[in-house]
Amino acid sequence: MILIYLIAALVIGTTQFLIRDRRLTHIVATLTIAIQWMLTIYATFHRDETDLSFFKFDGLAILMLWALTIISTVVMSHSTRYIETPLHLDLNKMTSQYYGAMQILIMALSAACLSNHIAMTWIFVEITTLSASALIFYRRGKGEIEATWKYVFACSISLVFVYVGILFLTTAMQPGMRESLDFESLEKNASAMDQFWLKMAMIFIFVGYSAKMSLMPMFTAGIDAKDEAPTPAAAMLSSVLMNTGFVAFYRFYRVIQNSGAYEWGRGVVLAVALISLFIAAVYLIRVHNVKRLFAYSSVEHMAVAMLGLAAGGIGVVYCILHVVIHSFVKSSIFLHISNLYRVYGTKQLSNIGRYIRYSWTGTLIVVLATISITAMPPSGLFFTELMIFKSMIDIHWWVWLVVAMILLTVIVWAISRDMFALIFQKEEEPAATDPKKVDMPLLEMAGQLLLLFIAIWLGIHTPTYVMDLLS
């Protein structure tokens, strides 16, 4: 099945790059979603089976694949309206390139989540960098060009770190262990590896994948990218791409859990989580751009997830669920930024205000999204954070819990301040163009509400099947 999927995805992606008719491009784009649903359903009914030796439909892969498929379906439906925005460029050519890059990105994300081999995971994560760069470059402006080169440079350096980490991992292995680099074999042989080289491997792999996860030290790679990318693409970068980076690191972290370096490894993860949380708090207080505001919010939530991973126990289960729920909330928010731009013609918070006057449907989504992203009840993130904090209490991490809660309080205040000012307060400075009253199309509103509903539902009443996948 994986071979059929990869061939079909590459054929559709290549075809999209060659088509120069927008209507035909939209028709072909539906095939992208069709094959994605086929793969997801197939994986669901073939759980724990291995395909092509390098891919396995395990619980984590299936869960992430469902999140990717649902989000990409909504994103593709939003893309249809987004790319109709008039530009001083060949719209037919840009449309084909946009959909072609989106198809390759979705394919690479799927394969990376399903990969059961550390080198294969690295290859597909690298492909996500190239396809995401084409999406960031979509509008061809000065800011987009700068953001694209920053993203390519930072992610390429990061993936070089991962490559070096894999080399250190092979150095840590005994001669008889080098038959396979699949994660199951690595977990099985972890205790017999050279602990020094295994620690070195973790440092390099963690630093490398931090660019995709939006964690310290390489979090800057994604901030400009999410700011300058088209909002549907930014929704993918701030949700499912981060999920894939998390999966890539988590599968390796399980190797550390089975080795003598576990206590050391969890200390590294804890330190990175707390520093990332501090960075997010500092930037969120001073940020002036709505897209960058939520880009830094991604740093916050991945840091919270890392706290659960470091704490262990039930914290690991809710760490993964936190990552999944966050992806639904954040993709909905970034998709809604398109409507904000239609109303105000700007992303600057100082030029945005009294949103309730111009779009009551949009205001409803902003209120729900603000409650969800700040982890207030009934947000699903409230329940996952609560269980992550419980896991920290279980191992008596009282000091780190207090530090994390203080930083989260600052973050909640900063986001709430800006969002409620956006809804109710008058603009601090008039925008270049007057705000326009805009009614959201029903399809867009339904898609964004669906994502928020799923995020709330997964927290309040996590389905038994989802908990089974997590366990």
Image (spheres, rainbow, N blue to C red):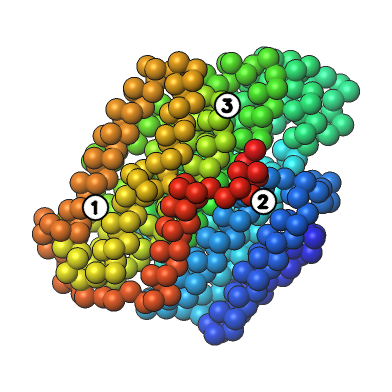
For marks 1 and 2 on the same chain, the one whose residue lies earlier in the sequence: 2
**Point 49% across, 26% down: residue:** 391
Task: Say if 408 sits above or below 60 in the image.
Answer: above
Task: Read off the residue under disc 2.
Answer: 62
Tag of residue 313? 3
Marks 3 and 2, how far apart in space?
21 Å
Name which quarter of the figure residue 425 lies in: bottom left
- Amino acid beneath label 2: Ile
Where in the figure is residue 204, as x and y percent of width and height? 60, 28
For marks 3 and 2 on the same chain, the one whose residue lies earlier in the sequence: 2
**Neighbour tally class for label 3: few under 14, some 14-19, many 20 plus, Cα within 10 Å:** some
**Point 65% across, 74% down: residue:** 31
- Amino acid beneath label 1: Met
Task: Say if 453 sits above or below 302 in the image.
Answer: below
Where in the figure is residue 357, as x and y percent of width and height? 17, 69
Tag of residue 375? none
Marks 1 and 2, how far apart in space?
34 Å
Tag of residue 419? 1
Residue contact between numbered discs 1 and 3, judged by CB atoms under 8 Å: no
**Neighbour tally class for label 1: few under 14, some 14-19, many 20 plus, Cα within 10 Å:** many
Relative depth, front residue between 284 and 161: 284
Q: Secondary structure at mark 2?
A: helix
